[in-house]
Image (tube, grey):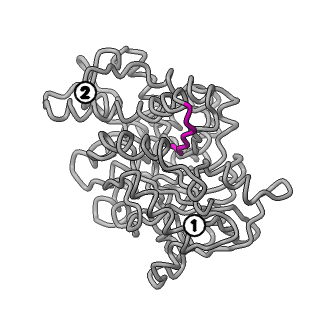
Amino acid sequence: MIACYVPWLHMHQPLVWWKIDKGEKFVSNLQKMLLSKDSRERWDARLIARAYKNPAKYVKQLKKDGYDPKIMLDFSGVLLESLVELEKNRVFNKIEVGGEKIGNTIKLFKEVLNKFPSSIEIAGSAYSHCYFPATPEEDWAYQLEEWQTTYKKIFGKRTLERVRGFWLPELGMPGFENKLVKLIRVLTDVGYEWLILPLQAVEGYEHLSYEKRIQVACQPHMLKIKGQSIPVIFRFPSDVIDQQAGCEAKEVYNRAKHAGKIFNGNKPALIVPASDGENGNVMMNEFFPKTFVPFFKEKIDKSIGSLTVSEFLGKYYKGNGKFHIKSEIKIKIFGASWVDTHKFWLEGTRRLEMIKKVEKLSNRFHAIKERLKDRNLFEEIKRALLIAETSCYVYWGTDFWFDQGEKAIDFANRRIDEL
């Protein structure tokens, strides 16, 4: 095998304030879309709901037919909770796409994760899809812990123990050594063994040749800073395999083989294209029938294989208790995201205002948290803070989403005021 291909799908829907009966409360944006008066929005919501089900559905079918599919997934904590709530209210039993009812997505994932644990690897993420470079450092550990608590509550302790890698929302990698040290520490403290990064975060990325970018992206590296370290892998360059724009099975095979020849290492090249799992026509309608299924039915051979990331690291980079990885990587001083810069989260008057308000809210919480003897109240206010840190509230740069962020901040502040 000269190359190992495994697709990665990132899944998230933010919470929004929505009028329910005579009041307002936080609901999933997916629920808001399903209840919309706009027929196009309602239809898109059905396709999105199906997209969340697709990985488990297609893995189950391929395994039934005797094939061995592999896929990486990550879900935000708020999305997992929203899927549970939608199914609790039997919403998915009432909608269908192309004659197929969506049904109980979480139940299906439980079945597949338990029955075929080597086919789907789930990576951890932040509870509310916070953008780490714009989130107070004091809350990073809370975001990680709340995600793990949510995942364990839904899927169980044994399934959580199989979560070994981590996905930074928007692949937002902080810069500056003090922040990187803190990030590595909080990740390893809660048990994460590796981290996926955007290739744009590599120091000197702009000056790397096409071949060098592939060589860097095709192998794991160690990120070491001031006594802290963690193995990292990279999202495969989208100018080679653009998963979200569409790349059918034959083309994935050819490009993975091309990358493997450029890599030309004594171990296989690791090919991890990553994209949103529900964003756009390709991911909602085409990826699984045109890429995923035919690849695992027809394209696995002696040259191109597939393993999940943790399987790959364990097989080819196994060491004494840890992965044995010689290559080291340095990160740009300012960090990066999967759209190169931080501008969609950190630039603009209102974005900066929101960051300051979130920082003030976080400071208020940390100032009073020791006095919160009631555990339920502590958890309620902490979750309100974490939700206020959702990246979507600033990313889109529109009044609707800014207003959602303002409402989330106001809600958390009111709960503190009530104390």
Badge 2 amino acid: Leu
Tell me what residue is drawn at x 59 percent, y 38 percent.
119
Circle 1 residue? 218
Q: Is residue 333 left or right of residue 292?
A: right
In the figure, residue 194 lies in which quadrant?
bottom right
Describe the element under mark 1 as helix, strand or loop. loop
Tell me what residue is drawn at x 56 percent, y 49 percent.
139
- The kind of secondary structure the magenta stretch mainly shows is loop
Disc sitting over residue 34 in the figure? 2
Query: Is residue 67 rendered magenta in the image?
Result: yes
In the figure, residue 162 lies in which quadrant?
top right
In the figure, residue 116 lies in which quadrant?
top right
Tell me what residue is drawn at x 40 percent, y 35 percent.
414
Q: Is residue 167 above or below residue 178?
A: above
Tell me what residue is drawn at x 30 percent, y 33 percent.
17
**What is the distance, in whole Å, between disc 2 and disc 1 at their CAs?**
40 Å
Q: Magenta segment, which residues?
A: 66-73
Camera-side residue of 178 and 200: 200
Describe the element under mark 2 as helix, strand or loop. helix
Residue 215, percent from left and from top: 56, 74
Residue 103, percent from left and from top: 39, 19
Q: Is residue 266 left or right of residue 320?
A: left
Residue 171, percent from left and from top: 48, 58
Disc sitting over residue 315 in the figure? none
Camera-side residue of 41 and 215: 215
Badge 1 amino acid: Cys
| Label 2: how many Cα within 10 Å (few below 14, some 14–19, many 20+) | many
Query: Is residue 367 rendered magenta in the image?
Result: no
Residue 360, percent from left and from top: 46, 53
